[in-house]
Amino acid sequence: MPDRGNIGRIILGFVPTFFLAFLVLPVCEAQEAGGAVFPVISRLDMRDTGFKQYFSDVESNRRLLVRFPSGIRQAAENMIIFQYTVRQGDDLLSMAARCNIPYSALASLNRLTTSSSITPGTVVLLPSCPGLFIPSNPNSELEKLTGSSRFSGEWFVDLNISISGKNEVFHFFPGADYTPTERAFFLNAGFFRFPLRDYRVTSSFGVRANPVTGNISMHQGVDLAAPDGTEVFSAADGVVLAIGDDPIYGIYVIIRHQNNWTSLYGHLQKTETTLQAEVKSGTLIGRVGSTGQSTGPHLHFELRQDGRAIDPSGRLRH
């Protein structure tokens, strides 16, 4: 979705070189998204015309990247960004493998903060050249970390890309990849510790019959049974966003974490923290109880990102 005819700037050793980056659309379906027209890939296999073109472009640019420095410049000039709508069963790492592109290129262009940030129906951008896309306005810890280790004599080109109708300026580093530290940060981000040391899962995330009312509804967390008074710990570093007493959740604590994550701890006997307190992973924040709509002592635990409930079962680690 870069603007065709956009002026790009490449820098090597702080010596600027200017070139015109012509972004030519291949012969395949194109559609509007966020005010930009760009090639569409419907399937990540060779039966799809768009994917065949994309895969060929990736192979060509990979060959160019080994020719330093002229090949790096040419690969940046040749880069085209495609669009793909995530299907059921897709995940970032498998998509990257099928596209023959490092997952760091997909993650940085789409401003993903974790390896599991994509869900079916999400529209993702696929660059036809390996490299890192560092936004000029980083807003996550990963983007700040990635940006702080670049700009020291490496080639980059400035690209103006329209994402969801908003123009973003990226510094594109052809051929660059995450450092080991950045890779560990990305792969481990979004994981949380269990809020209890000992527990028994009594209700999972998903549609269920409410044990009190019998009504069929969406259970947006997991229930962890434990004796009254059992210590409840913060699942990750964060700030206490809310403390309250609700007819459904009973006494609860909500903690705000990085990357727009929040965690909720419900049915508490009592709290052991204060509003706006800064907590670390493993900080004592409350005690298991049976307040609110509850059939016995347990912890109701929820995880949300951008306000959307996420199944905690795949994100909790001991």
Image: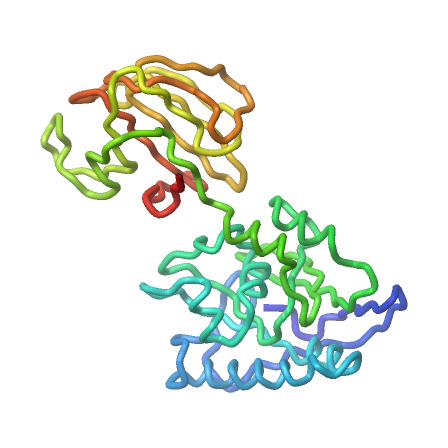
Answer with left or right where residue 290 lies relative to residue 20.
left
Looking at the picture, tell me which residue is in the foreground, 290 or 83. Answer: 290
* Quadrant of image for the N terminus: bottom right
74 is higher (above) or lower (below) than 3? below
Rendered location of residue 244, percent (x, y): 38, 16
Q: Determine which quarter of the picture holds residue 120.
A: bottom left
Q: Determine which quarter of the picture holds residue 232.
A: top left
Q: Which residue is drawn at 39% across and 15% down?
A: 271
Q: Which residue is drawn at 71% across and 66% down?
A: 173
Answer with left or right where residue 50 lies relative to residue 74.
left
184 is higher (above) or lower (below) than 282? below
Looking at the picture, tell me which residue is in the foreground, 90 or 4. Answer: 90
Q: Which residue is drawn at 30% across and 29% down?
A: 198
* Quadrant of image for the C terminus: top left
292 is higher (above) or lower (below) than 121? above
Looking at the picture, tell me which residue is in the foreground, 249 or 168. Answer: 249
Q: Determine which quarter of the picture holds residue 284.
A: top left
Rendered location of residue 125, percent (x, y): 52, 66
Q: Residue at x 57, y 84 (%)?
A: 59
Rendered location of residue 283, percent (x, y): 48, 24
Rendered location of residue 152, percent (x, y): 82, 59
